[in-house]
Structure formats: C-alpha cells, structure tokens
Image (cartoon, rainbow, N blue to C red):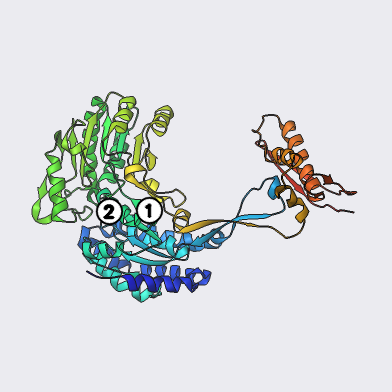
Amino acid sequence: MANYSETVNSLRSVFQSGRTKNLKWRRSQLMALLKLLDDNRDRLSEALEKDLRKNKFESNLMEVGPIRNEVIYALNNLTDWVKPEKVKKGILNMMDKAYIRHDPLGAVLIIAAWNYPVQTAILPMIGAIAAGNCVVIKPSEIAENMASLLEELIPKYFDTECIKCICGGIPETTALLKEKWDYIFYTGNSRVGKIILKAAAEYLTPVTLEMGGKSPVYVDEDCDLGTVSNRILWGKNSNAGQTCIAPDYVMCSKETQDALVEKMKITLEKFYPEGPAKSSCYGRLVSDRHYQRVKKMIEGGGQVAVGGDTNDSERYIAPTVLADVTFSDPVMQDEVFGPVLPIVPVKNEDEAIARINAGSTGAPLALYVFSNNQQVVKKFLDGVNSGGCCVNDCLMQGSIPTLPFGGVGSSGMGRYHGRFTFETFSHKRGCMERGLEMESVNNIRYPPFTKNKEKIVTWILKQKLKSNANMSLVIYFMFGTLFAVFLKLSNIDGSTIRTPRVTLRQVCILKIKNFDLSIIILASRKE
C-alpha cells in the first residue's frame, strides 16, 4: 500500500511558507484552471462520453460550463471574499476593532465521485484554491478515463508543489485517509461517507460529506402535467439518472398519476424521437455492478407503465416509470440512482409529508414540489427537512452559485458552491484589536471587586429585548452611550469613581431601522 506521508508533509511545508496565502498566487491558479477548461473542453467531453456516454451538449451544460462559470465567479469576487468582515460591537467594545478573518486551513483532500467526475473534483478545488490552501484531488477510479485525463492535465497547469492529483482505487484512498489532513471534502454514497468520517475523527479533521438519498417529488392536482412531465423526466434521466439530486420518486393522487403517466409517454417520444436506445442524447450506466442493481429495481414493485427495456452489453436501461408503487416495495428502500422513476399514489400533501418524514433513508438531499398553491408549497418547506428545495422544476437549485448546496442528516453535512465553497475551506477567525490607552477605564474589571464596581458592571452587561417603541430605544442607547463615554473619561479605582472636570463635544448620529439603533460618537475632549 502506498504511503503518502511525504506528500502531505511537503504540502504542509509549502503552505507554512505562506505561498498559497498570497492573493496573486490564488488568482494565478484560478486562471490556470480556466485555461485548463478552455484548452481541453473537447478532451473532457470525450472522457465523459467514454465513461458515461454523456452527450457533448450535456457535458457542457452539466459539467464544464457550470465549472467555468464558478471559476469566473470566484475570480470576480475573490478580493471581496478575502477582506476582513466587520462585525457589530456593544458598549464595552465601542473603541475597539472587531472583525473576522478568513484564513486558509492548510492541506486539504478532495475525494470526487464518478457520476459527475469533473464537477465533483473541480468545484470544491475552486473554493479550496481561492481560500489559499494546498490541495490533493483523488478522482474516482470508476470513471477511469476522466481520472486518467485529470492525472495528466493537473500537473501541466498548476503549481505542482501545492496542487496534486492522486489516482487509484480503494487501497490508495485508504492510504490517503490514514494521513492527517486539515480538511476532507467527499462526494459519494453514505456507506463510504461513514468510513471517511471515521478516518477524519482520528485527527479531529473537519469534513464535508456530499451524499444523496431518496429525493421526493410531490405533484399537486392544480399543475399543467405536460410541463411537469418535461421537467421531472429531464431531471430524472439526465446522466441516465445518475445524479445525486435527481428526482427519486413521485407522490401524487391516483388520478394525477394516471394522467401524468400519459403525459410522460408523450414527453419521452418528444425527447428521443428515434427511441432512447438509439439516441445520442441518452447515457448509460457507469458499470456492470450499478447496471445490475438498477435493473433489479424494475422488478422491485409496481407496474411498468413506461419503458422497462434493458441491454446488458451496453449497460442500457430505458427511461422507466413504475406506477402504483407502495412504500414497502423494494424500489422504495434505497436511492435509485438510475433511470427508474417510481410513482406512489397518496391522498394529499399531508400524507406525502408524513411519508417522507417516516422514511428510513432520512432527510433527502433535494425536495421537489410542483404546485401553484403557495400554501401547499409552504407546508412542504415547513414540514420536510431537506438539503435543498426546488419548486416547479428539478436540479436547477444547484445552478445558482449564491445558494448553498449540501445535505442534512443522512444526505450529508457541509455546503459549497460560490462563496460557500470559499468559506468551507476557510477558518473564520474572530479578531479584536484594542489600544493601550485609557487603561483607567479597565480598572472596573480588575481586583479588588467592590460593590460599586459590581453595580456598574451589572448595569453595563444587562441586555434588554428590542421594544416596538422607537423612543425607548433612542433613550436607552443614548444613555448607555453617554455612560460609556463617561467611563472612558473617568478614573476608576478599587472603591470610588473620581470624576475630573469634563467637557464633551459630541455629535450623535441616530439611525433607526427595524428598531436597530447605531450611535457614533464623533468627537470628545477631556480638559
């Protein structure tokens, strides 16, 4: 088994030198990534076609295009992301500087998945580089053509002392997990996720686990079922159903199910006029093992209402819809992760919510609701816990870089995309700076502790709930601020406050917004 101790130690040594913290270095590596994507767009598409039979259009739409946009988004916003973040202060810290730094973590490990082998490797890397870390990418060995291509390209474009690609299977992954990392980012299934989490716990290493689950769809009776059919089947059958946020099963009334099935037949004829088996727009299962697993699900309950055809030699499974499925059927026990869509009839949205919450697979990564009724939508948002939610569409919540992407409970932990990736690979470091002047004010916190000091400290520390009365807030904060200034200009010893003659020139700016008051003392003078 390989030993990666030297690799990790080398990365950490370079990190401690400060090279990756430099903003110019971060920009240069992000620009190198942009060049990699632009120079090798065709080669990336070819590797995806070989591994998953992805159409070039789908590769650009679902992999290369979104990654490229994320790189540009990071480059456009990096200067703002790295700035110290100012925070609000109370009376005790009026004269201090308080802010949050975003510091890089060190040497981080990214373990990618096979279903989106470019996206799950590169998207986390964008934030890791932007945050100033050294990075090791471990591509999935199942998507072997993409793994080989990344292993070739990454050393050509990046600083090889800071960014590395290590390929291999279970032995290599096991060896990598034995090392002490400063962060581990994993995309895959929950079984391996538990192994990752256990290995990380050995060193108290923080992790992000991007997993999956049975993402449910509820279709209300008030919907245009033709549009619903288009959007569900696009989300379900993209990448031949091998998408972590793909619709896993549909719930609706029995009447809606029957009408929806007919619309789905029309949709599939429209999507694949020559049939999905002959269409260049329809993918294949990634391996024989995954193919056999999904194939068995077709026989795992319900009636085959649409599709059902298979071809072992091509690992082909037609887009399949199962009707009249029950929650006890085998197809409902695990995530499908393939082009098989069970439809489970329910009475109404209340039963659907109860069934989701009673499911054995835990909180889903995605929740989909098709309805024109905002009360129904709100019921699901309030009543179901999920990693993310999309109303009246599928998958598209993952395309917005300003939305966090991640699971909850058994569907994962942590979040990324856009700034959230940068923050995932950063330590938010709270900092306060105070001058050495006016030490007499600090005497109130030093021994000996007197009754007089206790009264003053108790008053200063006492918090009050916000009131609906604007004037009471104005009076309270003005008095508190004036008292703070009084303390600043006073000499406090162990028992008494000796107040010299004081003349104050001060201008107060009062800003009231939603009962939030800010008071700024612009000038003061002690005679």
Task: Say which of 408 and 427 sits in front.
Answer: 427
Residue 476: which quarter of the image? top right
Query: Which amino acid is tagged 1?
Result: Thr
- In the picture of the structure, the residue carrying the numbered disc 1 is 208
Q: Residue furthest front?
A: 448
Which one is in front, 435 or 232?
435
Q: Quadrant of the N terminus?
A: bottom left
Residue 302, position in %: x, y?
Answer: 15, 33
Q: Earlier in the sequence, mark 2 or mark 1?
A: 2
Apparent side of residue 447 relative to residue 496 in the rendered image (left or right): left
Query: Measured from the top left, where is residue 312 in percent x and y?
Result: 9, 52
Q: Is residue 195 left or right of residue 93?
A: left
Q: Is residue 94 left or right of residue 394?
A: right
Give residue 195's mark: 2
262 shown above or below 191: above
What secondary structure is marked by label 2? Answer: helix
Q: Nearer the viewer, residue 470 or 503?
A: 503
CA neighbours of label 2 inside 10 A, class few (<14), some (14 to 19), many (20+): few
